[in-house]
Amino acid sequence: MWPSNPWIKKKIKPGWTVYRGQSGLVVFHPVGWQLSERGNGGFLAYRPSLQGNATAMILVQFVKDIKQTAASITQGLGHFFPDFFPGVRISSVRTISETPEVSVARIDYFAAGSLFRGSSMFYRQGGHGALKVKGHSGRFIGLP
């Protein structure tokens, strides 16, 4: 199996490791981050603080049977994922590509008493797409 290949292990940057999920999902991530699978190839990765709260996060989710535009999904992030983005404020939504359709936005939200700032990107081609959200407590992480 390739993840146990010694050549691959040599190529992993210092301070990084590999998550190998039960479904076959493989994600390279910084040491100390926690990962969980979300189905359909999606995952949530976060860096916990000493108290156990997330200080940074990345959410990747694949979506099927999309009828909305990429921009409307980006704008509706709080509706689609209310558990992750309570009271999210979305700004600077823009479409950066028409084919495939890609939109990006800045996001701000509170979780566990901390302000998180980050960016959201939704990629759509045909009826399928992928959402990527990254955020960090207390500072803005630039748009992709």
Image (cartoon, rainbow, N blue to C red):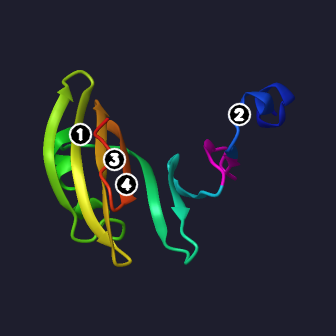
**How far is disc 2 from disc 4 in space, using C-alphas?**
24 Å
Amino acid type, residue under disc 1 in the picture: Val
Residue at the spot x=27%, y=24% of the render? 100
Tell me which segment is drawn in magenta. Answer: 19-31
Q: Residues within 10 Å of mark 4 (few under 14, many from 20)?
A: many
Question: Which is nearer the N-term, disc 1 or disc 4?
Answer: 1
Question: Which is nearer the N-term, disc 2 or disc 4?
Answer: 2
**How far is disc 1 from disc 3 in space, using C-alphas?**
12 Å
Task: Give the mark toward the camera: 1 or 2.
Answer: 2
Question: Which is nearer the N-term, disc 1 or disc 3?
Answer: 1
Tag of residue 135: 4
Screen quadrant of the C terminus: top left
User: Circles 1 and 2: CB distance less than 8 Å?
Assistant: no
Tag of residue 141: 3
Residue under pointer 2: 12
Report helix, strand or loop for mark 2: loop
Question: Which is nearer the N-term, disc 1 or disc 2?
Answer: 2
Amino acid type, residue under disc 4 in the picture: Gly
User: Circles 4 and 3: CB distance less than 8 Å?
Assistant: yes
Residue 21: say if magenta.
yes
Report helix, strand or loop for mark 4: strand
Residue under pointer 1: 104
Report helix, strand or loop for mark 3: loop
